Amino acid sequence: EAQVTQNPRYLITVTGKKLTVTCSQNMNHEYMSWYRQDPGLGLRQIYYSMNVEVTDKGDVPEGYKVSRKEKRNFPLILESPSPNQTSLYFCASSLRTGASGRNTGELFFGEGSRLTVL
Amino acid sequence: SQQGEEDPQALSIQEGENATMNCSYKTSINNLQWYRQNSGRGLVHLILIRSNEREKHSGRLRVTLDTSKKSSSLLITASRAADTASYFCAMTTDSWGKLQFGAGTQVVVTP
């Protein structure tokens, strides 16, 4: 089954304790991205990756790191979490448009990771 | 700043009625997509409309795009209780890097 898998789904942690949220997709997608969702703000992009070893900042990258060492994995790292990073996090992936432009641009989302930082 | 704004923020209708929600955006786009999110779940892609298209259909969904007004609408016809969800528009302004979402419209369909 084609899917994007995030772990953990729920996490309560304390300020300053490093954590990693993993994301894995089994669709051989080139593009992967992280979003955070907060009430009234919709989804805001944190980081994205166009391919292995290629990452770039989204709209709210402060306090986060990512890496893309393999095509299927795109972990989100919070080196020193703070309470304002309490949020619902989503990983998503997509095929990248080729020269033919045949890709639909559809993003496939994971089920989300609810993070609470005390 | 957010690229898309959706209207209304919330919509309550009865089964069988149509639901219409609108999305306005600020800058030129390559394409616009609509997603659905059931409570506490991941988003699910509904439909994509490219900047050179004006209308698109998928089952009970109808999407329009007016690039001169920088706006799009999503119409759900003959709504069902299972359509209860939040609906988000999302748009790309460059080739693939950023997909920016609106704040969403929360739709409640009562039986």
Image: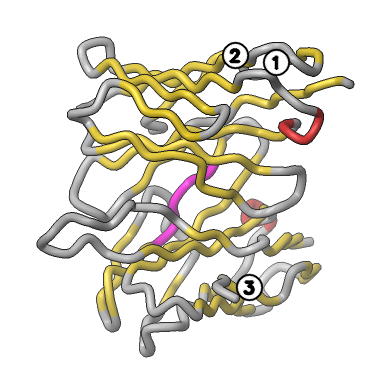
Q: Residue at x 20, y 12 (%)?
A: B68
The answer to whether marks 2 and 3 sit on the same chain is: no
Quadrant for the C terminus of chain A in the image: bottom right
Chain on which label 2 sits: B
> Residue tagged by mark 3?
A6
Which tag is nearer the camera, tag 3 or tag 1?
1
Cα distance between the residues tagged 2 and 1: 7 Å
**Element type at mark 3:** strand
A8 vs B22: above or below: below
Dot 2 amino acid type: Pro
Task: Examine the residues drawn in magenta and state their main secondary structure.
Answer: strand
Dot 3 amino acid type: Gln
Q: Residue at x 57, y 14 (%)?
A: B20
Relative depth, front residue between A82 and A104: A104
Q: Which residues are magenta?
A: A43-47
B69 vs A110: above or below: above
Residue B11's label in the rendered image is 1
For residue A42, side relative to residue A52 (left or right): right
Cα distance between the residues tagged 2 and 3: 31 Å
Residue A114, picture quadrant = bottom right
Q: How is the image coloured?
A: secondary structure
Relative depth, front residue between A22 and A60: A22
> Residue tagged by mark 2?
B8
Residue A89, picture quadrant = bottom right
The crowd level at tag 3 (other Cα within 10 Å; few <14, some 14-19, many 20+) is many
